[in-house]
Each structure stands twice: as C-alpha cells, then as structure tokens.
Amino acid sequence: MKSYPNASIYDPSVLRTFFINFENPQWEAELVAFNNTDVDVPATVIVDGKTYADVGVHFRGNSSFGVGDGYKRSLNLSFDFIHEDQEIGGYNTLNFLNANGDPTFLRSVLSLHIARQYIAAPKANLVQVVINGENWGVYANQQQFNKDFLEENFETRKGTRWKIPQGGGAVGAFNYQDEEISSYQGTFQIKSKEDPEAWKAIIGLAQTLEITPKNQLVEALSSRIDIDSYLKFLALDNALVSGDGFWTRGADYCLYLHPDGKFRFIPYDMNEMFNFRGGGRGPGSSGRYTGPTGVRLDPLAGLSDPDKPVIERILAEPSLQKKYLGYVKQIATESMAWENIGPVVQAYRELAQHEVERDTHKLYSTEAFLAGTDDQPKGDNLRSFFDQRREALLAMEPIRDL
C-alpha cells in the first residue's frame, strides 16, 4: 500500500491505510463484549511504515453499532492508551466512522468541509482500514473533540467540553429545569475535568433564556454565547438538513465553554446530513414544527418549538433572526453551489472508488456509492440534494427578501 509520511492525518487528497493487528483472532467478538464499557483492547497499528504499539481500540457509536457482526462498525483508536506520549501526526485519538446510513461515505466529510468554512468544526477525510490482514475497506476519519481540537481552533487547551448525544431533547436545547446540577448531567456528558462553575454556566444560560424579557435578550446572551458562531452553527444544521440533529432534537452536538465564559456549539454527528426526508421529530410539545422537511425544510423551523428555547427564543429576536437567515442564504448561495462542492465530491469519489469496489464489509453496494456520488442528479444522490435544497432555500420568502 502507498505511504504518505509527509501528508497530514486529515489530508483530503490521500487515502491512507491503517493496519490494525490484534493478538486475539476473535478480536471482533472481544470488542463487542466490551462495547459501552471503559475497556479498550490493545492492538499494534502500522501506518506509513511506522509501528505504534499498544493502541487502545473500541467500537463507538449507537445505531452505527447495530449493523451486525461481519460488517464494519465505527472504531476509536487511542494512541496514548498505554504510552502517554505516543501520538500520530500530532493527534492522540482517531475516530473511524462506518458511514451508517450513508452509501456515499461522504456525508460527514462533506458537511464538516462546509462547516469549517464558517465555524470551528472537526476535520475529516477518508481512510482505509486493514484488520489482522483482512481488508475492512473505507471509513470516514473524523477528528476527536478534545484538547487538541481546542488548541487548533481556539489557541487554548483550557475550558470545559460536553457531548450532548441523541436523546438530549429539551434539556440539551437549554430548557431550564431547576438549580440542581444533577438535572443536567444526564444530558450534558462532560468530557473534561469536573468544574461546578461550568455547570452553573449551563444552568445560567438556560435560566437566561427562560426569564429574560425579549428586549433585553441580546444583551443578556452576549456574555454567555458567542452569538455569531452559534447562528452559523444553527444555519448549517438547517441548511444542510440534519436528519437527526440539533434543529429536530436539540441533541447530537458538542459544547465548549471557552475561558472567556462564552459557549461555542460544535458539530458532531454528521452522517445523517443532506437528508431528503428531514428526520424524525421525536417527543415534544404540541408547538413542535410540523411543516415540510427534507429539501423543503423551513429555515425558521425551530421558531415554533418552545421546548427548544436556545433555538426558539433566539430566532424570535428580529435582529438575530435576520443575521441567521443571512448565514443560511450565504451557505446556500456559496457552499451548496455544485460548481463549488461538486469538485470536492468528485475528488473523493475518484480517490475511494477502487477501494469501495474491493470492500466486502461495507454496508451498501458499490452501485449505491457510484450513484450517490455521480456528477449528475440521480434520485436522492448528493448532486440532487444540493441542487434541490439550494433552489428551495433561495426561493423561500424569508431568504429571498433579504
């Protein structure tokens, strides 16, 4: 296999091969047995001719885990599992995603490619994985949300990090519960050192959204949220139609409390972006959005959902709504134009096609990959989504009249 010793781990132009070797030939059963525990299975990993010993490996993901034995599951690799100073290309942890629900392998990679044009977001590209000498094919390689990510994007390793997984619901959308930290801990999964003051900041934001008069909201929020990056985060989630993300569930995102005291919202679970169906609405109040989904999703969908005050209250403020809609229009006009995103799709298609064809563990057929990444609109492929969603957004009254 080719080696790329001088290319970065997230270089979009290379398909780097990771050779993972477990001592146990029944490694898959072992990883299944330890799923959803804090146990990693050690492996030797060879990349670009260099050997990394005692790398901790475990399966990751929820619905992506349920694909069944013999099919690719998402993997987490901790290079500093045993050897504290061991890293690869400046990174301690890698995440290989199995593209569950995504025959193109590209939804996470492309949506993060677009997101990084506007806000701090994980890097991503494609890699190939070989386990115990057997080809396990192509995976999306998505950057870990850790201190390395903070340093790259915010020039600091300090601050508090949370993950808000699927099921976060109203609490994850900052619906005020009470003054007890425990009321929020089940939803906001802390990924850094415990800090009571950080938890108080979460409660404070929820309370601000609960009690602040409309004419004082912008000023009250300005010390708690980086408002501009939040509006871009929200615009990306809606414009790119997350099928299982923030606008619909108030979940599946990461949260960072910067040392400046302001929250930043970070994209996380992106494999259901570019969704023609729009995703389920989940449990919620009678005020939940019930309009068109998919490519016809209303950019103001969250305005009708009081269960998600971090969306509903912010979009109800005219100046913030106008700025948000401006970002939706910019994303549609520039980032979703096929002349801009199409060459990215075609470069990845050319890079990965041969290995996708050889992949016997993939979740979808080679034909589905080729159709999904075709340069011409075919069914529900990527080209069709970008063309239809862009046209629909730019024709909608609140966008058109800006």
Image (cartoon, rainbow, N blue to C red):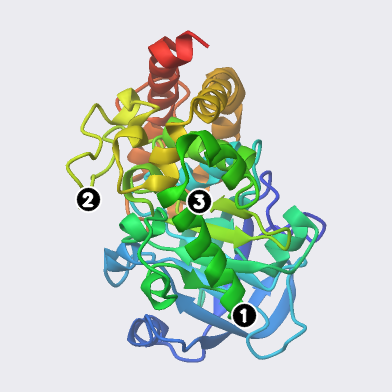
Closer to the N terminus: mark 1 or mark 2?
1
2 or 3: mark nearer the eye = 2
Q: Quadrant of residue 19?
A: bottom right
Marks 1 and 3, the one that precedes in the sequence:
1
For mark 1, give the secondary structure. loop
Taking the image as shown, residue 192 lies to the left or right of residue 246, namely: right
Q: Choose between 287 and 367: the one closer to the eye.
A: 287
Give the left or right position of residue 261, taking residue 213 as reference: right
- Residue 193: where, in percent of width, then height? 62, 80
Mark 1, other Cα within 10 Å: few <14 / some 14–19 / many ≥20:
few
Mark 3: amino acid? Glu
Q: Nearer the viewer, mark 1 or mark 3?
A: 1
Name the amino acid, label 2.
Answer: Gly
Q: Is residue 104 visible?
A: no
Label whose residue precedes the other's in the sequence (2 or 3): 2
Residue drawn where x is 72% and y is 66% of the image: 148
Along the line of sight, the residue nearer the viewer: 323 or 328: 323
Q: Position of residue 284 (x, y in %)?
A: 22, 50
In 3D space, how far apart are the residues under numbered discs 1 and 2 (Cα atoms)?
32 Å
Kindly identify which residue carries mark 1. 193
> Which quarter shows the N terminus?
bottom right
Asked if the residue under mark 3 is in contact with the one under mark 1, i.e. CB atoms within 8 Å, the reply is no
Residue 3 location (% of width, % of height): 73, 60
Q: Which residue is mark 3?
A: 355
Using the image, determine if residue 309 lies above or below residue 82.
above
Residue at 52% across, 61% down = 204
Q: Circle 2 — which element?
A: loop
Q: What type is the residue that disc 1 sits on?
A: Lys
In three-dimensional space, the C-alpha distance between marks 1 and 3, rounded to whole angstroms, equals 41 Å
